[in-house]
Image (cartoon, rainbow, N blue to C red):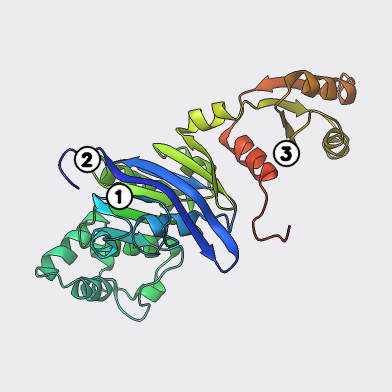
Amino acid sequence: MNAGTEFAIDVRGLNKHFGPKHVVRDFSLQVRAGEIYGFLGPNGSGKTTSIRMICGLLTPDPGSGSGTCLGYDVLRETAAIKREVGYMTQRFSLWEDLTIRENLNFVARMYGMKHRREAVDGALERLGLQSRANQLSGALSGGWKQRLSLAACLLHQPRLLLLDEPTAGVDPKARRDFWEEIHALAADGLSVLVSTHYMDEAERCHRLAYIAYGKLLATGTAAEVVSSQKLHTYAITGPNLAPLSTALRALPGVGQVTPFGNTLHVTGQDDSLLRAALAACTSDAAYRVEPIESTLEDVFISLMAGATDNFVEQ
């Protein structure tokens, strides 16, 4: 990154069409060096397309937007950007009939690295893979495949790491270990873009962007994103919550009703209307209604409900 450059990513007004569909619309983003930036949004919302445009893996529409990534122009210097990016896809994309060491050595050769043995040994050590170095990759569990994929992404010492739903299908401990490693990398100055559907992972990011069907709808820290939506949320406990949920959804002021175990979370943006709806349906003393802090998941569901799928014919 150029000396004195505050942002690892600074882009404005990027657009992308696939045929007649406007998949990403006027996308703008700033990411500081060493920041973990999370992308939230429904499937097909343009998260991956946006990330790929930023990092030189996909070309924006002609004449669309401007900006830099790692100090390079996102429209004219895509080759230079790609050399300094590590990209980890959702699906395991290495060779299952090679061992862990063979996979890493092959990737190092693809990058034309001069000191391949040292680089591979360093990656094995950092990700705790030494004891399994000679194990076939196809025999690994999801968590170990995840570690191998991350090791391969880091071999060429990128300055920017792209993670596309990296923890799908792995157990909670593997997810926690993975995020501890990502935070350690960020502390060393690596910038990270990660798309995820897990709210607990989103809360581990320094900042977030919520994208729905090509549009950036909210951005900031997790607390800022929650606050920006000005949602009011109440928790209801009591008997027969399923019919109560149906009744509440039909009333004005109720934006969303979401079951959470033995509790309903009821959200809305007009608190007076929401209170009136709750009073009308929960006058029975068996119900307990109390205000609670809105969560990132409440906001996620609310934003999804208000977004229009740009692949649906209008």
Q: Secondary structure at mark 3?
A: strand
Q: Quadrant of residue 143?
A: bottom left
Disc on the earlier residue, 3 or 2: 2
**Residue 285 percent coordinates (x, y):** 87, 18
Compared with 25, 281 (above or below) is above
The x and y percentages for residue 229 are 60, 30
Residue ID at (24%, 58%): 84
Q: Identify the disc placed on residue 258.
A: 3
Residue 314 spot, x, y in % from top left: 73, 57
- Tag in front: 3 or 2: 2
Residue 5: which numbered mark, if any? Answer: 2
Looking at the rendered structure, the secondary structure element under dot 1 is: strand
Q: Could you tell me residue 112's position as x and y percent? A: 16, 73
Quadrant of the rendered image containing residue 31: top left
Label 1 is placed on what type of residue? Thr
Q: Closer to the camera, 66 or 273?
A: 66
Q: Residue at x 74, y 36 (%)?
A: 256
- Disc 1 designates what residue? 68
Of marks 3 and 1, which one's residue comes earlier in the chain? 1
Q: Are marks 1 and 2 in contact (CB under 8 Å)?
A: yes
- In the picture, measured across the screen, residue 216 lies left or right of residue 5, that is right
Which residue corresponds to the image point at 17% horizontal and 46% vertical from the top-left? Answer: 2
Residue 249 or 69: which is nearer the viewer?
69
Q: CA distance from mark 3 to mark 2?
A: 44 Å
Asked if residue 8 lies left or right of residue 44, the reply is left
Q: Amino acid at mark 2?
A: Thr
